[in-house]
Image: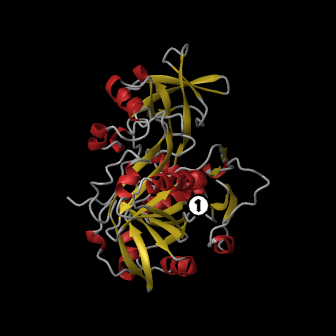
Amino acid sequence: MQFFGRRFLLLISTRKSDILYKRLYSSNPTIPLQRTCLYDFHVAQGGKMVPFAGWEMPVQYKDSIPASHTHVRSSVGIFDVSHMLQTRVTGKDCRRYMESLVVADVEGLSENHGTLSVFTNNKGGIEDDLIITNTGDGYLYVVSNAGCRDKDFANMKRQAEKYRSDGMDVQVEMISNALLAVQGPQMTKVLQPGIDHDLSSLPFMTSTMATVFGIPDCRVTRCGYTGEDGVEISVEKKHAVNLVEKLLLSQEAEVRLAGLGARDSLRLEAGLCLYGNDINEETTPVEASLLWVIAKRRRQTADFPGASIILEQIKSKPKRKRVGFISTGPPARAGTQIFDESGSKSIGSLTSGCPSPSLKKNISMGYVETPFSKTGTCVKFEIRKKKYEAEVVKMPFVPSKYYILK
């Protein structure tokens, strides 16, 4: 998911193949940047802090970004994602209320199960992506993006007030906890000794309350933004540093802190969208190749914002689609123009791109006219007034390793 801002600068250092991704998101310079409860800890650990969606966040630590990326793919990395919006939605009408904002079948969620969804507007555009979990404890647990924090919460509060004025029972409350993403193939080995829950019974997109390394009342959700097995742990701020320190001291595997640079290259290899770059208010779920987030029942009820536009696109196909690419030449960045194979016709543009640390190839995603979206289609990228060959490929670029019960 997850999503975060409007603009970024991608800097490449060719020395020792070090790729430095440094995000500089546009924000109002008169408003001070916010800091998570782990800010001082990041600085003490050598984190390089940069502006990110209105927050000061670590882009990397002592490791290069490719090294950090590779470590998460092979062992375990910890990401501070406390800047994201966590919301508790309560009341007997909370599921019906939530469905007035998103395309998911919230009513159909089993206890302690979650789903990725999107807020849509009346034009069918994506206002944000989010994860909704039916906790089984009388409320919905919602996590959405830092870059849309104010917009999302205002939208949820406004719709809740409308529902209450119609006599319905729903309340929306911001959760002030820290949020940690523990990601990588060794996650279970690291976390299982310190949690009072059998992680083998917690598959992808399920959630539970647990005590973690002696810290009570943690919400542990099997999900993540890397394509690897992992969890996100919502924990009271006062316990956040203690929890991170205990995870880093694991004897089961080498655990390292990871920053925004590795998080971005990992999510791109996993074929996941970055809000504000790959999806936005002008992009529909159909155009974004996110058709699977629109639940079957919701297509039938057609009662979510922008339903008529989205359902018509499903029926007649959109004019453009998000696809993945592997390309030759220099790494292609967001904004790179895409041409047909002859190089004469402009057919779209890229929204994300980087050299893949795992594949040692240039990967990217973007939007092209639908006739050019078929896998295997050859296209050309224009980079610094020169054209380079590229090919439409399936995503994810690196196979996902989510823990799914068979």
Which of the two residues, 373 or 46, is positioned nearer the viewer here? 373
Residue 98 x, y percent position in the rendering:
40, 53
Residue 379 x, y percent position in the rendering:
48, 23
Q: How is the image coloured?
A: secondary structure
Left or right of 350: which side holds 11?
right
Specify the farthest residue to the right: 30
| Numbered label tally | 1
Provide the secondary structure element on which disc 1 rests: loop
The three-letter code of the residue at mark 1 reads Gly
Which of the two residues, 350 or 141, is positioned nearer the viewer here? 141
Which of the two residues, 39 or 339, is positioned nearer the viewer here? 39
Residue drawn at x 64%, y 53% is 53
Task: Check the image and report above or below for 70 versus 25.
Answer: below
Residue 50 x, y percent position in the rendering:
69, 57
Q: Quadrant of residue 261?
A: bottom right
Task: Check the image and report above or below for 11 versus 226.
Answer: above
Residue 107 x, y percent position in the rendering:
29, 54
Q: Quadrant of residue 43?
A: bottom right
Residue drawn at x 43%, y 35% is 306
Q: Residues within 10 Å of mark 1 (few under 14, many from 20)?
A: many
Q: Is residue 66 visible?
A: no
Residue drawn at x 53%, y 23% is 380
- Report which residue position mark 1 lands on: 259
Q: Quadrant of the C terminus?
A: bottom left
Task: Check the image and report above or below for 167 versus 121.
Answer: below
Q: Is residue 212 visible?
A: yes
Left or right of 63: which side holds 284?
left
Residue drawn at x 53%, y 72% is 177
Specify the farthest residue to the bottom: 214
Task: Check the image and report above or below for 284 versus 60.
Answer: above
